Structures are given as C-alpha cells and as structure tokens.
Image (tube, grey):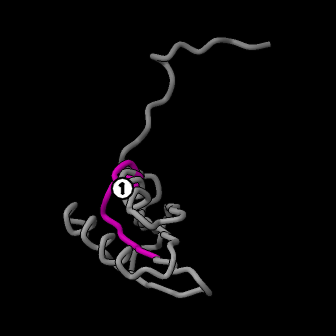
Amino acid sequence: MHQAIPVSSSPTVCEDLSHCLPGFTLTHTVHLVSGLDLGVVSTAAGVLDGEQVVVDRWAVTRFGDVLEQKIVFGDMTERRAARLREQLAAVDGVLRAKIEHHFVRAR
C-alpha cells in the first residue's frame, strides 16, 4: 500500500552536514580524467582560482594515454562541491569527472 507524501512534509536537503558527526569534517575529492594534455590541468586550476577555492591536495597521475587529476578540498557545502565538479567536467578535454564526499576524523 502506497501513501502519498505531500512535498511540504518531505525532508529538506541539509547544506552543512558537519554537525551530524561531531569530530569529523566533510571533504570533497574531484577526479578528472583527460587525455595527455597538460592544458586541461592549467584550465582546471584557472577554474578553481576563479572560484577562489582552497585546494588541500592536488595530484596528477599518468595512466597510459590518460591523466587523472585528484583534487581534494574541504570547507564547502556539498552543493558547491557538486557545482565545481560540473564546471570542471565542462573543461575542454575532460573525458570523465566524478566527486566523492568523505567524512574525515578531525585532527
């Protein structure tokens, strides 16, 4: 048996989940895969610079004929991180982009 749930009573999306797990912080990792074009790396850096994003770690690794960029940043909402992934996915030459959200134990 199904019961319709009015939209007004559905839960809202929480922008900041840090209060859900005290002692943990929310970080975001974006993975970008592109061909062997280092211009994609500099363009991605320009996107993040333009958005004034603080990057915690950034690694570029070559796997055969592709480059994978692993960009880690924190101190932002999940929604903003998802928008950044969309902007980075739109960079010319990016073949694939995904984002991971992680709760990390605070130091």
Instruction: Inspect the magenta stretch and tell me whether residue 81 lies in it.
Output: yes
- Under circle 1, the secondary element is helix
| Residue pictured at 59% horizontal, 15% vertical | 5
Q: Which residue is mark 1?
A: 87
Height in image: 49 above or below 12? below
24 displayed left or right of 42: right
Height in image: 13 above or below 74? above
Height in image: 3 above or below 61? above
Residue 7 showing in the rendered view: yes
48 displayed left or right of 102: left
From which residue to which does the magenta span run?
Answer: 70-82
Which quadrant of the figure contains the N terminus?
Answer: top right
Which quadrant of the figure contains the C terminus?
Answer: bottom left
Residue 29 placement (x, y as % from top left):
46, 68
| Residue pictured at 52% horizontal, 71% vertical | 33
Determine which quarter of the picture holds residue 62: bottom right
Residue 2 placement (x, y as % from top left):
74, 14
Residue 106 placement (x, y as % from top left):
40, 74
54 displayed left or right of 101: left
| Residue pictured at 50% horizontal, 70% vertical | 31
| Residue pictured at 38% horizontal, 62% vertical | 91
State the residue in front, 66 or 48.
Answer: 66
Residue 19 showing in the rendered view: no
Q: Residues within 10 Å of mark 1 (few under 14, many from 20)?
A: some
| Amino acid of disc 1 | Gln
